[in-house]
């Protein structure tokens, strides 16, 4: 297949090769996925020869979307990254080697990896996959099977802490697994259910101290290349301390039921996976993941906390926030809010945290401490006592105004400058920049604690009295200002808004209807903020 195109590329007849490729590409939707991936491989080779790196990368990404097991595409991805990010290049080569069965090509890939090992910038480490187990034998088996299937051999160890499972067969399975596997498998059998934080800490202490750590619930099932793209995120730059995946069920990291309905062939609602059963739910989620797991130019959503069901931490981050390797604060036992607490500690230590939009992990939801119905409320109160604030007040973006920003971005098709007086820990910035990456978002925080966290997400931050402080940005330099009118004076807002800018705020009560009418009537047409200033001061 594609003999003519292959020959044209090999002989350097790139003009004719482009014509031949275009002819083949017209029918790519009719091809089997593996054949479509091979066409993308040839396309990438063609663009490489023509020195168009952007087109080459896009072709590689499309090919991997068609066939996530094509080793030649991952090899090309490694070559692409070789002089850009040596760590991501190594991970791509590692994936290529895992998928390659041809001995001659395996040698080529190994040689490429050996060359990278000579680079002192290489810091890719192996992975300690820490699984906390409690009952759910079938899900536990699926979890470990998915690790063995989708994580390259030799790149990991598994550490399992069983939290006093009572279900028949769980401990027997784990003991047999520990004896029979040909990789490093550590098993710790607790005499009592110690809860999530303490159970994870018991496992953390047993992990290889040279490794990164991947905390994985026993009811979580990996999809193809999920761990690869999580590790790509972890090694995006030296400031990244933790990464997490998208899931069907994970707080603030969910693929919506609406997005998954197409793959189910029916409308899905909340907790849909509990209603459809594990087999069908996993298949639906894997079908979605198959079409969305591929290299992306901007695959990361910056966050200040990640959900603990599947969280990967760098060795540096672990050593920084937990020198004794007790990563989670056991104050939050039996569970809940320990991941929020870790997120704050990581952020205050200067580590970025990413949700990877090209990594997907199914999560069923477990039974670890379901018997303690008050655990969430108690842990929430513990968090407030420890930190002095309720994190639930910081987690969600202001959807009404953030979506309005996204709508304007789609209309203008260009980057926007946004000033956010409701910055907090950067939830608005995280949400907006995940869809509108070339926006510039400046955040105004009320104190240095907020600023220290949000500066890892927003492009720039300032803190102080939001009404009287002089902000470090030019007057009338923002396309959009986000503010709550009940907290921020209109003069402060207008000072920084462009003449044709947009002010986004909450709905005002009746006594301020006149003000809202002025703002709305001008905003609908793209208002003149200088004129508005005069009107408001009359």
Image (cartoon, grey):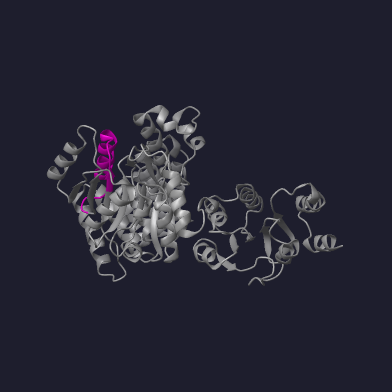
Vertical comparison of 69 with 385: above or below: above
Report x, y in % for residue 369: 34, 40
Q: Is residue 133 above or below residue 535?
A: above
Residue at the extreme right of the image, as rendered: 538
The quadrant in which the C terminus is found is bottom right
Given residues 500 and 12, the one toward you in this image is 500
471 displayed left or right of 310: right
On-image quarter of the N terminus? top left
Most extreme residue toward the left is 179
- Magenta range: 131-154
Residue 493 falls in image quadrant? bottom right
Residue 289 x, y percent position in the rendering: 40, 41
> Does the rendering let one see residue 128?
no
Q: Which residue is rendered at x = 15% and y = 45% of the image?
A: 178
* Viewer-nearest residue: 441 or 5: 441
Q: Is residue 255 visible?
A: yes
Q: Was residue 146 drawn as part of the magenta stretch in this picture? A: yes
The reply to whether the magenta stretch includes residue 334 is no
Residue at 28% x, 70% y is: 119
- Can you give x and y, in whole percent of width and height, for residue 8 in the image? 37, 51
Counting the numbered discs, the total is 0
- Residue 363 image position (x, y, % from top left): 37, 40
């Amino acid at each position: 297949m594609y003999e003519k195109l292959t020959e044209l590329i090999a002989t350097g007849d790139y003009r004719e090769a482009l014509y031949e490729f275009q002819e083949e590409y017209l029918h790519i939707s009719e091809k089997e996925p593996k054949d479509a991936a091979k066409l993308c491989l040839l396309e990438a080779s063609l663009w490489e020869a023509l020195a168009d790196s952007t087109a080459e990368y896009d072709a590689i990404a499309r090919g991997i979307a068609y066939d996530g097991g094509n080793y030649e595409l991952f090899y090309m991805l490694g070559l692409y990254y070789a002089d850009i990010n040596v760590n991501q290049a190594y991970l791509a080569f590692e994936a290529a080697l895992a998928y390659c069965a041809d001995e001659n090509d395996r040698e080529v890939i190994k040689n490429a990896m050996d060359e990278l090992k000579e680079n002192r910038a290489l810091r890719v480490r192996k992975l300690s996959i820490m699984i906390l187990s409690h009952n759910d034998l079938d899900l536990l088996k699926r979890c470990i099977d998915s690790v063995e299937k989708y994580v390259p051999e030799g790149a990991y160890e598994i550490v399992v802490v069983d939290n006093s499972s009572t279900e028949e067969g769980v401990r027997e399975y784990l003991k047999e697994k520990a004896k029979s596997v040909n990789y490093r498998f550590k098993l710790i059998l607790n005499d009592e259910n110690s809860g999530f934080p303490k159970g994870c800490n018991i496992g953390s202490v047993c992990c290889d101290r040279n490794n990164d750590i991947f905390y994985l619930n026993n009811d979580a099932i990996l999809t193809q290349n999920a761990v690869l793209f999580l590790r790509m995120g972890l090694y995006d730059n030296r400031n990244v301390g933790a990464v997490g995946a998208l899931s069907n069920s994970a707080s603030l990291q969910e693929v919506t039921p609406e997005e998954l309905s197409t793959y189910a062939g029916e409308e899905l609602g909340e907790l849909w996976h509990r209603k459809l059963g594990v087999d069908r739910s996993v298949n639906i989620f894997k079908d979605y993941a198959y079409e969305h797991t591929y290299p992306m130019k901007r695959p990361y959503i910056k966050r200040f906390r990640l959900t603990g069901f599947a969280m990967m931490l760098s060795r540096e981050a672990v050593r920084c926030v937990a020198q004794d390797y007790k990563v989670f604060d056991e104050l939050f036992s039996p569970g809940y809010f320990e991941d929020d607490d870790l997120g704050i500690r990581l952020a205050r230590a200067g580590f970025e945290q990413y949700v990877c939009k090209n990594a997907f992990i199914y999560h069923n939801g477990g039974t670890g401490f379901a018997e303690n119905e008050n655990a969430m409320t108690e842990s929430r109160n513990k968090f407030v006592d420890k930190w002095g604030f309720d994190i639930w007040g910081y987690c969600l973006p202001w959807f009404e105004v953030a979506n309005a920003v996204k709508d304007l971005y789609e209309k203008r098709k260009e980057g926007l400058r946004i000033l956010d007086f409701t910055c907090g820990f950067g939830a608005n910035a995280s949400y907006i920049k995940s869809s509108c990456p070339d926006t510039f978002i400046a955040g105004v925080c009320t104190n240095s604690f907020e600023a220290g966290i949000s500066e890892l997400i927003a492009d720039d931050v300032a803190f102080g009295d939001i009404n009287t402080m002089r902000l470090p940005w030019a007057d009338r330099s923002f396309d959009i200002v986000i503010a709550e009118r009940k907290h921020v004076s209109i003069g402060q807002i207008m000072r920084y808004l462009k003449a044709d800018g947009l002010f986004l705020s909450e709905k005002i009560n009746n006594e301020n209807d006149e003000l809202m009418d002025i703002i709305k009537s001008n905003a609908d047409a793209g208002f003149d903020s200088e004129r508005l200033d005069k009107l408001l001061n009359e």
